[in-house]
Image (cartoon, helix red, strand yellow):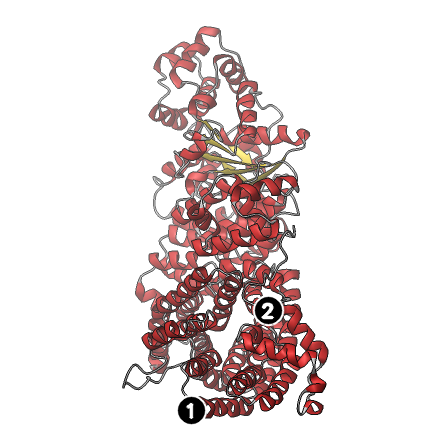
């Protein structure tokens, strides 16, 4: 026991960071390594290709050759990023985390934002992570080769498809090397046709005759004559593992001729010689050491001491290495090791023949060691290998919260759940709460509802809650927290508000992270129910909680919710201030191109659009697009689609704008978010009104049920009180020329906006009233109403929603700005003249030409990163459909981007755009 306690203290060298480092560097090379100039020349030829494919069975020296290749590149000024893959890397988030870490390990400028996203808590989108990584690579100015070793272990089809996309868009200075035992599961035919692929296989990696002679002499200790080498080479066909094992056997053979006569070079013969000539010739304790440690993918002396209950593993490892028994060092300090795959497979096969439960005990001890060192994947895997499902379930329960709430490895948790019996899962509520959390945040709402109902029923039945697993009160707090988040995400703000208020009363001393989450939910509910001051107080609670537990992701949410409250009130100045504060938080730790960043940028895009900062609105939309369909509250998704559509409309792309709104509406139906669909449907009607097509707008509104059809009564709508729906219906009634009736409804809406504190909506409604009074012939009163509207608009930072509403309003503004002294009642008008000028400047020189006024001057060369990327893809010959697939957007969005690029470059087509870009050194 004393030895065990001492081993537990000796953990500095075996931290999780060291284990990660072992995956991020090629194995250490022996000073006696065989030089292979011909293979080296082939590998160097791969530098001219986008992809170098290395496929050969185990034992052909792929890893060693690539490690030599990497060492040769360094003097040439070429950086190598290395990642040794394993079976656990089939989790997309884990794969991307390690891929980013490999690039960051090679060059500190790479992968930082992607790592921040992956580690930023909750869920990270695979699309967004790949896009973020490509963004880094596109901006990298040095030659770099990325090596992914043991790629055959990655079997996740989604990762295969994303890697294909990444390969297709790599810049010329970045190369990729994939090493696999099997044929690559990727579509590489286009690369092959373009001459951007070099494929090397077992034929290239097998040793030549001279190389075999040198190699056998080194390993066996004595050289063979030419005929004997020829015999071995013919039998093994240059297979390095076969030659090495035969050489080891020759070292202990008295009759070389007899050995060579019997040796076939086949896998079975190699296995026989491993047993008879190599393994069985070792002393028993060393043989037992090899067999029992073979179940460890990677190991160090401390881990071996633990699983074998001994204290001399460091010396044993040194002896294994001195005997040339297929041991590879994984780090510079030679702390971590692994066996060659072929040797490990053989040892594991022999280990299964050991009597009793010897290997099960090794797995259990390994699981315990990894658990203590907070390495969940290895701990759980060894529990499964030990066939101890109870222990595996306990480990999954202990790791699930950290894994999904803070690291977002949902695929890992789901994979574990497929291997656990339902009875074990149901007996451990922590697993089920982790599962429910993942389902909510991945927008799998029906499944989340089912799991939450089951958990709530279990809590209601006190006998179903195992006190030994968790304290019942703590469990209820977690379930209720997830339920609060569920209501917020599914567009039920009143339920979210009431449940979160109850939660905070019931658990005033709960864990800081849970408290912060629920306080944020309360703020979201307060925003939608117009309880603004209560929402601001809730956000103060959330910030204190998240600062206490150092959760920047939660702080970013708090900033986004503060933006939503300011936007709901109509205060664009306050919303932008909150946006800047939130973006500063995510920039320092999570990266703007992250889920946290996307929440803020999608909302900020709407604010920038309102303030007529159209270029910045476009940049924010570009940053938020990869996440828009996958994450966040309804308001964030709505803001993204509305702003995209409005920018498209300003470009004159009316069809694309409508398609954008339809895309978002379809998403709302798919995710069962009726509020999203309804708001975007109302905007589709508004677009038709702005285009001067009231009849089309009426037909569409009737089809959605916004207004009555014939003698029917318009149905009550869940979002009938939404600002955008209210304005659309009022504008439609005035467009129909319905006499004085609409003024009554408009005045009612104005009173509601005043009561609820919706200052932005109030300004828009007063502006609508002023325009309609002007049309009704009451010019003096219309100017007074407009003055009242514009005072509010100036105070709260509104521009674009007034400019987009009605061309007549602009004429009235011009009149007000040009000749206020001549107006009746002008002395009562208090709107700042500077604001009037700001409005007219934003509208362009022509008061009546707002719709055609370009928001960005033609010919400017300030292209966004996304636009530059599209130019590169254009240069590669991609069409609109291929561009859409590459950018994860619709073809309509691609057309919008192309329109922007052409306008900025002052051209009208792709050919001219590429020529202008070349002239200005943009490509």
Q: Percent from the top left, x then y, of residue 518?
A: 52, 78
Instruction: Kindly check if marks 1 and 2 are in contact, taking CB atoms under 8 A apart as contact.
Output: no
Quick one: 187 or 798, which is closer to the camera? 798
Q: Percent from the top left, x then y, of residue 744?
A: 46, 93
Q: Percent from the top left, x then y, of residue 595?
A: 53, 62
How far apart marks 1 and 2 lie (CA) works out to 46 Å
**Mark 2, residue position:** 556
Snapshot quadrant of residue 192: top left
Residue 210 appears in the picture as rendered: yes
Which residue lies at the image location 54% right of the left edge and 18% below the top edge?
A: 38
Quick one: 773 or 917, which is closer to the camera? 773
Q: How many marks?
A: 2
- Tag 2's secondary structure? helix
**Mark 1, residue position:** 741
- Mark 1 is surrounded, within 10 Å at the Cα level, by few (under 14), some (14 to 19) or many (20 or more) other residues, namely few
Mark 1 vs mark 2, foreground winner is 1
């Amino acid at each position: 026991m004393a030895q065990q306690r001492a081993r537990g203290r000796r953990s500095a060298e075996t931290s999780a960071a060291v284990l990660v480092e072992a995956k991020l560097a090629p194995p250490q090379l022996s000073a006696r390594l065989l030089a292979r100039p011909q293979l080296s020349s082939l590998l160097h030829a791969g530098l001219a290709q986008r992809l170098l494919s290395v496929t050969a069975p185990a034992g052909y020296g792929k890893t060693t050759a690539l490690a030599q290749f990497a060492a040769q590149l360094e003097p040439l000024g070429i950086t190598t990023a290395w990642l040794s893959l394993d079976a656990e890397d089939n989790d997309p988030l884990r794969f991307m985390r390690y891929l980013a870490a490999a690039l960051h390990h090679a060059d500190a400028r790479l992968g930082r934002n992607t790592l921040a996203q992956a580690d930023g808590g909750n869920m990270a989108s695979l699309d967004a992570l790949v896009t973020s990584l490509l963004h880094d690579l596109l901006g990298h100015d040095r030659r770099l080769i990325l090596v992914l070793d043991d790629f055959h272990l990655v079997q996740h089809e989604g990762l295969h498809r994303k890697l294909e996309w990444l390969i297709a868009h790599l810049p010329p200075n970045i190369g990729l090397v994939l090493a696999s035992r099997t044929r690559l599961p990727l579509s590489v035919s286009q690369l092959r046709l373009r001459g951007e692929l070099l494929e090397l296989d077992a034929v290239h990696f097998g040793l030549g005759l001279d190389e075999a002679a040198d190699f056998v002499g080194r390993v066996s200790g004595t050289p063979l004559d030419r005929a004997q080498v020829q015999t071995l080479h013919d039998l093994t066909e240059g297979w390095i593992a076969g030659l090495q094992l035969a050489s080891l056997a020759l070292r202990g053979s008295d009759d070389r001729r007899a050995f060579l006569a019997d040796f076939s070079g086949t896998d079975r013969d190699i296995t026989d010689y491993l047993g008879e000539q190599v393994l069985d010739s070792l002393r028993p304790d060393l043989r037992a050491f090899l067999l029992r440690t073979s179940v460890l993918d990677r190991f160090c002396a401390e881990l071996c001491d633990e699983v074998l209950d001994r204290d001399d593993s460091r010396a044993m490892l040194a002896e294994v290495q001195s005997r040339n028994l297929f041991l590879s060092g994984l780090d510079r300090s030679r702390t971590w090791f692994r066996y060659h795959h072929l040797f490990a497979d053989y040892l594991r096969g022999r280990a299964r023949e050991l009597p009793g439960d010897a290997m099960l005990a090794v797995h259990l001890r390994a699981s315990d060691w990894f658990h203590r060192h907070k390495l969940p994947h290895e701990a759980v895997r060894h529990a499964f290998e030990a066939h101890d499902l109870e222990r595996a379930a306990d480990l999954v329960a202990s790791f699930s919260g950290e894994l999904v709430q803070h690291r977002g490895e949902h695929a890992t948790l789901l994979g574990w759940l497929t291997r656990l019996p339902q009875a074990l899962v149901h007996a451990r509520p922590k697993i089920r709460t982790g599962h429910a959390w993942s389902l909510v945040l991945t927008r799998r709402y029906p499944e989340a509802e089912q799991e939450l109902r089951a958990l709530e029923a279990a809590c209601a039945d006190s006998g179903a809650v195992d006190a030994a697993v968790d304290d019942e009160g703590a469990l209820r707090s977690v379930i209720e927290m997830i339920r609060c988040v569920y209501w917020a995400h599914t567009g039920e703000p009143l339920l979210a508000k009431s449940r979160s208020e109850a939660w905070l009363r019931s658990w005033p001393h709960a864990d800081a992270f849970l408290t912060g989450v629920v306080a944020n939910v309360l703020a979201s509910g307060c925003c939608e129910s117009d309880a603004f001051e209560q929402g601001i107080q809730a956000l103060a609670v959330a910030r204190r909680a998240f600062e206490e537990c150092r959760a920047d992701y939660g702080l970013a949410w708090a900033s986004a919710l503060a933006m939503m409250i300011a936007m709901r009130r109509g205060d664009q100045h306050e919303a932008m201030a909150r946006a800047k504060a939130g973006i500063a938080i995510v920039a320092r730790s999570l990266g703007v191109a992250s889920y946290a960043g996307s929440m803020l940028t999608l909302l900020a895009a709407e604010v920038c659009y309102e303030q007529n900062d159209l270029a910045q609105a476009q940049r924010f939309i570009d940053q938020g697009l990869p996440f828009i369909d996958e994450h966040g509250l309804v308001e964030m998704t709505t803001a993204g689609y509305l702003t995209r559509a409005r920018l498209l409309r300003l470009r004159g792309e009316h069809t694309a704008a409508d398609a954008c709104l339809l895309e978002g509406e379809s998403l709302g139906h798919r995710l069962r978010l009726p509020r999203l669909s309804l708001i975007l449907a109302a905007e589709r009607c508004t677009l038709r009104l702005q285009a001067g097509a009231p009849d089309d707008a009426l037909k569409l509104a009737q089809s959605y049920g916004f207004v009555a059809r014939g003698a029917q009564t318009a149905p009550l709508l869940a979002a009938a009180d939404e600002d955008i729906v209210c304005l659309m219906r009022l504008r439609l009634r005035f467009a129909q020329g319905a006499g004085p009736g609409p003024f009554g409804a408009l005045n009612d809406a104005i009173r509601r906006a005043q009561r609820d504190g919706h200052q932005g909506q109030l300004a828009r409604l007063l502006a609508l009233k002023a325009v309609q009074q002007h049309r009704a012939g009451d010019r003096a009163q219309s100017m007074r109403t407009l003055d009242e509207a514009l005072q509010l608009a100036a105070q709260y930072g509104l521009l674009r929603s007034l400019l987009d509403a009605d061309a007549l309003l602009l004429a009235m503004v011009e009149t007000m700005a040009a000749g206020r002294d001549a107006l009746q009642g002008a002395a009562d008008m208090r709107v700042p003249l500077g604001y009037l000028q700001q409005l007219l400047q934003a509208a362009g020189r022509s008061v009546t030409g707002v719709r055609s006024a370009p928001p960005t001057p033609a010919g400017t060369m300030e292209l966004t990163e996304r636009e530059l990327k599209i130019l590169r893809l254009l240069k590669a010959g991609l069409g609109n459909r291929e561009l859409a697939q590459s950018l994860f957007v619709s073809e309509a969005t691609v057309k919008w981007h192309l329109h922007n690029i052409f306008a900025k470059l002052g051209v009208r087509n792709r050919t001219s755009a590429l020529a202008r870009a070349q002239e200005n050194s943009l490509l």
